[in-house]
Amino acid sequence: MTTFSYQQSAAMLNRSKKVLAGGVSSEFRRYNHPHALFYTHGQGSRIYDVDGNEYLDFTLSQGPLILGHSHPEVLKAVAEYSQQGQIFAGQHIRELELAETLQALIPSGELMRFCLDGSEAVQTAFRVARAKTGRPKFLRFEGHYHGWMDNVCWGISAPSAEALGSSAQPEVFPWSAGLSARSREDFIILPWNDLPLLADTLSRRYQEIAAVITEPVMCNSSCILPGPGYLEGLRDLCSRYGIALIFDEVITGFRLALGGAQQYFGISPDISVFGKAMGSGYPISVVSGKREWMELIEHSEVIHAGTMNSCNPTVAAALATICELQRSQPYERLFRYGQELMTCLRNAARKTGQNLLVQGPGPMFNTGFTTLPAIRNYRDTFSYDKAKLNRFIAGMHDQGIRIIGRGLWYISAAHGQSDISRAVTAAEYVLSTLDD
Ligand SMILES: Cc1ncc(COP(=O)(O)O)c(C=O)c1O
């Protein structure tokens, strides 16, 4: 098997550490194998580093590259539209066309505003919900990721499952130093997928709660699907108590279906947030929702602003991405390839006697080593053998297969049958080399 060298990246990382804090521009980029790497280019399902290594890419750059790297239609649209200008501090035709396209696709998307990334769009949704309800808090769930701003930078890391304490009143830990202490007062946190617990909490505390925010699939902790009736129950409870139901579709958007998880599951949130796959790697996101909520922005009661919002290249990229998704309809294939890969990984684990758990809907799924038959919530994720996962990810990487460090895989429209077979062959080999 090939031996990969990372010498050029190592040298550049040393240089980079003198100018970029930690050598990188986002915390998540530190955690590559064997260290942060430098890439030269990406094409289709492949990405290449400065040492000349080629990887079959299942990270899709943390999700955005649903069409694969360097899709020609996206590049063409960006180049052509940028010729007309970059940003106008005013409206432009493609922005209008993008909004009209999204309005037709997103079931609850009556009115919207464009932002630059998921984190910003989430905060905009909270502001709308607080303004309309006059209530101060949002309710969120353990292990769900909604960006890195202060009030959501909690509840995604903990020393152990035991440290989380009782489900009814969980302990919560900051992910970062320097968070405003008041940001802890912004939210109530609960374990996910437990409807009776949620119903009980809302019945007692709804007068404090402006919004409930959820990833419709808990992609950021093990790709957990909602239990039967959970999203329906959530919808009913939010309607009963006048609470905004916010779907964070930053991962599920344009990935489970063109209209996101809300189309896939047939549940209509009040407000939803899309990012990542929407722009094929260009910084654009959208906060979209029902008119009765979004009209607060319409009437300037809630302020949403941003110098760089909906600038030409990002809008052109998003429009080209969505048109290409509409034209090529890759969804059946994303599910089929994803589920085939999941089945083959399970078979490989069985053959090699490894306790690899593979779960998720298919277009994205998670791998981890545990003795549990399923991971049902964030607390269960503490059963994972992280050291073994790291060895698996490193082994796959040295075979030219790039997977997100926490075990998450994304399928793109650029992946083909031979890519799936190649990943399976590599996994069979790596699993056969892993000790406990
Ligand atoms: C579900 C979810 N919401 C929000 C965010 C934040 O988005 P961004 O990194 O674009 O700010 C992420 C990022 O990974 C995410 O996965």
Image: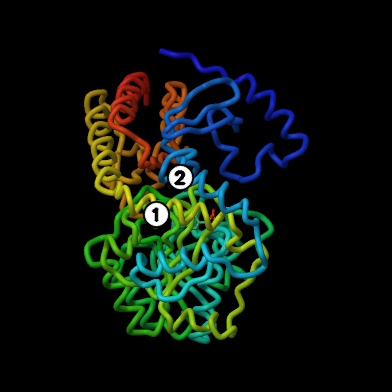
- The answer to whether 415 appears left or right of 340 in the picture is right
Q: Residue, x 40% and y 64% (percent of image)? A: 101
Query: 403 or 63, which is in the foreground?
Result: 63
Residue placed most toward the observer, 219 or 64: 64
| Label 2 crowd bin: few (<14), some (14–19), many (20+), radius 10 Å | some
Q: Amino acid at mark 2?
A: Glu
Q: Is residue 116 left or right of residue 427?
A: right
The reply to whether callout 2 and callout 1 are in contact (CB within 8 Å) is yes
What scheme was used to colour the molecule? rainbow
Above/below status of 379 relative to 88: above
Q: Is residue 277 left or right of residue 362?
A: right
Identify the image quadrant of residue 365.
top left
* Viewer-proximal residue among 407 and 301: 301
Whether residue 392 is visible here, answered yes or no, is yes
Quadrant of the rendered structure where residue 27 is? top right
Query: Counting residues from the N terminus, which is met first, the one under dot 2 or under dot 1?
Result: 2
Horizontal and vertical percent for residue 334?
30, 44
Residue 372: x and y in percent read 28, 43
Relative to 176, residue 194 above or below = below
For mark 2, give the secondary structure: helix
Label for residue 73?
A: 2
* Residue 39 spot, x, y in % from top left: 58, 31
Secondary element type, mark 1: helix
Q: Is mark 1 within 8 Å of ligand 1?
A: no
Q: Quadrant of residue 46?
A: top left
Question: Residues under labels 2 and 1: Cα distance?
Answer: 9 Å
- Mark 1 is on which residue type? Cys
Q: Please give the residue where the numbered disc 1 appears in the rendered image.
A: 323
Residue depicted at 58% across the width and 59% down the height:
116
On-image quarter of the C terminus: top left
- Position of 226 relative to 300 (above/below): above
Binning the other alpha carbons within 10 Å of mark 1 as few (below 14), some (14 to 19) or many (20 upward) gives some
